[in-house]
Amino acid sequence: MAELKSLGGEAYLALPPGYGPSAFAYGAVRGGTEGPRGTYPGGGGGADFHPGALGKSAESSGEQSGDEEDGFEAGVKGGAGFEREGKLKGGALGKKPKEQRSLRLSINARERRRMHDLNDALDGLRSVIPYAHSPSVRKLSKIATLLLAKNYILMQAQALEEMRRLVAYLNQGQALSAPLPATLNPFAQSAVYPFGGAALPGCPEKCTAFTGAASLCKHCNDKP
DNA sequence: TAGGCCATCTGGTCCT
DNA sequence: AGGACCAGATGGCCTA
């Protein structure tokens, strides 16, 4: 996986290759809304999910009660982990006592809930980082969300530091008429755009879709 | 069709 | 013992 190196200045919010522009390219229209991917039923694991048993509506913690029969019955054919090393770890499902199967279902449900909570948290993160929030743009992937958030935090930290330096400078009683050293003047430096000075791929559309205070990229900001 | 992303299942480990 | 967390595996969906 591409490492996110320390980024300087306006590149803070640029995602590493494979996550940045591609995240948007990848994020291009995807059947309109981003709703459930329709993978719940069945999902992986080979479990035969009851369609609809695990809809997006039930994604949040709290739901999923009752340990809906995850498809343990006929399901789990070669499901995750089961055929590893050619053997059935922990015993074949069919041979599991009902009690153990019940326990497994409970564990599965709990894990599912945990992952849903994690996804909810990621959604919350997506909602506060600057990128094009639009129905026509697919949401950021998990990895892109994390990397973008990290860069955003770094960018904010840098901005804060610059402001501190500026305040300290002004507090020293320096004449305002004197031009600030470039290193102290945040406004003399190039503005920090989440996607750097280059035009964001699909810039006009995405920048207009972006609901933040500023444009996503300098290119767009220069052309109101 | 390959690759990316995702949801889910599962067993192991650690903690309470 | 039970729950949380984790990583590996699997299969489905979608896009280029």
Image: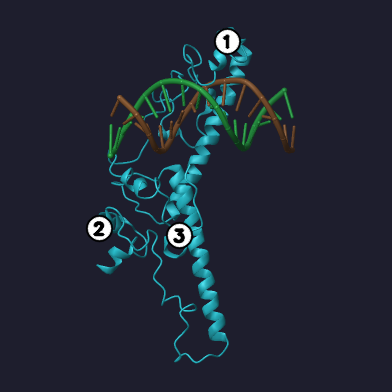
Chain colours: A cyan, B brown, C green
Say if A63 sits above or below A196 in the image: above
Callout 1: few (<14), some (14-19), or many (20+) C-alpha neighbours within 10 Å?
few
Marks 3 & 2 on one chain? yes
Q: Position of residue A223 (x, y in %)?
A: 24, 67
Element under disc 1: loop
Q: Position of residue A86 (x, y in %)?
A: 55, 12
Q: Amino acid at mark 2?
A: Pro
Label 1 vs 2, first from the N-terminus:
1
Check residue A5 in the rendering and tell me which mark sits there, or answer none: none
Say if A176 sits above or below A53 in the image: below
Q: Chain of mark 2?
A: A
Q: Nearer the viewer, mark 3 or mark 1?
A: 3
In the foreground, A153 or A73: A153
Query: What is the distance, in whole Å, between disc 3 and disc 1 at their CAs?
Result: 50 Å
Residue at image coords 28%, 43%: A29
Label 3 vs 1, first from the N-terminus:
3
**Residue lying furthest top in this view?**
A95
Check residue A12 in the rendering and tell me which mark sits there, or answer none: 3
Q: Are marks 1 and 2 in contact (CB under 8 Å)?
A: no
Query: What is the distance, in whole Å, between disc 3 and disc 2 at their CAs?
Result: 21 Å
Element under disc 3: loop
Residue at image coords 30%, 59%: A199
Residue denoted by label 2: A204
Query: What is the distance, in whole Å, between disc 1 and disc 2 at their CAs?
Result: 56 Å
Q: Amino acid at mark 1?
A: Ala
Residue at image coords 55%, 35%: A114
As drawn, is B12 to the left or to the right of A182?
A: right
Check residue A92 in the rendering and tell me which mark sits there, or answer none: 1
Element under disc 2: helix
In the foreground, A177 or B1: B1
As drawn, is A134 to the left or to the right of A90?
A: left
